[in-house]
Amino acid sequence: MLLKAHMRLCQRCLWCYRSGLCLRSLSTVYRSGGNYYELLGVKPDASMEEIKNAFFNKSKKLHPDSDLSNPGLHSQFVALSEAYRVLSREALRKEYDQCLRQPAPSSRQTFSTKSSENMRYWEQFRYATPQEYSTEQLKKKKKLNMHLVGYCLVAMLASLAVHYFGFRKLEEIHNSFMDEKDRAITEIYNDSKERARANGFKRQTEILRQKHAEFLEKYKVRSGADDDK
């Protein structure tokens, strides 16, 4: 329903724009005593090239700078420019030709009918009766609004508090995890250091060589097993 109303409004706006363009063109024509084709001195079926050449030829004669002592040239040049602007564009020329083919009384009657329809359409949105509130109702609305504002502030503060304590707890968990890792690494280091001191440098070197040989042997055996597969 709302989409139909919007489409109807857009169609009416487009119609009003076209009607205004027709009325503007016709008013310019009536003031100048002829139509745009007569102003340019071309036939209604003239080509765009003929219209362009006619405009250039006449604009040289009617340009205000060509005769500064003749103030009437300005209005004539404006009418000529308007005629060329409309007739040089295909869409505007079609609309202008339709306006010329329409009789003046019927177009005015149609315009007045559409205007009255527009007025009736907008009447339902105009001058809406404001809802009257008593003093007690105004106080209740104000109190309700204050409560809503208070709830919003409380929710915002609660959200900030939850984020703050959540980040603090996350930081504590992270620090505890890192401390535990440091403690385990430190214990391994101290244990290795004590065993190295107890075994002596030569004994510890032999142990490391033995472990390295075992590692290489294991690696070779595993690589051989993978190759067999």
Image (cartoon, rainbow, N blue to C red):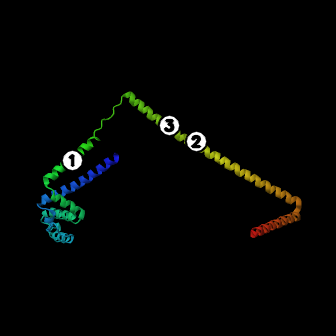
Q: What element carries label 2?
A: helix
Residue at far left of view:
33
Residue at far front of view:
229
Mark 1 = which residue?
Answer: 115
Residues marked 3 and 1 touching at CB (< 8 Å): no
Specify few, some or many for label 3: CA neighbours under 10 Å numbering under 14, 14-19, or 20 or more. few
Give the amino acid at mark 3. Tyr
Specify few, some or many for label 2: CA neighbours under 10 Å numbering under 14, 14-19, or 20 or more. few
Quadrant containing the N terminus is top left
| Separation (CA) of disc 3 from disc 2 | 15 Å
Mark 2 = which residue?
Answer: 161
Q: Position of residue 4 (x, y in %)?
A: 32, 48
| Separation (CA) of disc 2 from disc 1 | 61 Å
Which tag, 3 or 1, sits closer to the chain's start? 1
User: What residue do we see at 24% from left, 53% from top?
Assistant: 15
95 to the left or right of 147: left
Q: Nearer the viewer, residue 83 or 217?
A: 217
Q: Nearer the viewer, residue 48 or 32?
A: 48
Mark 3 = which residue?
Answer: 151
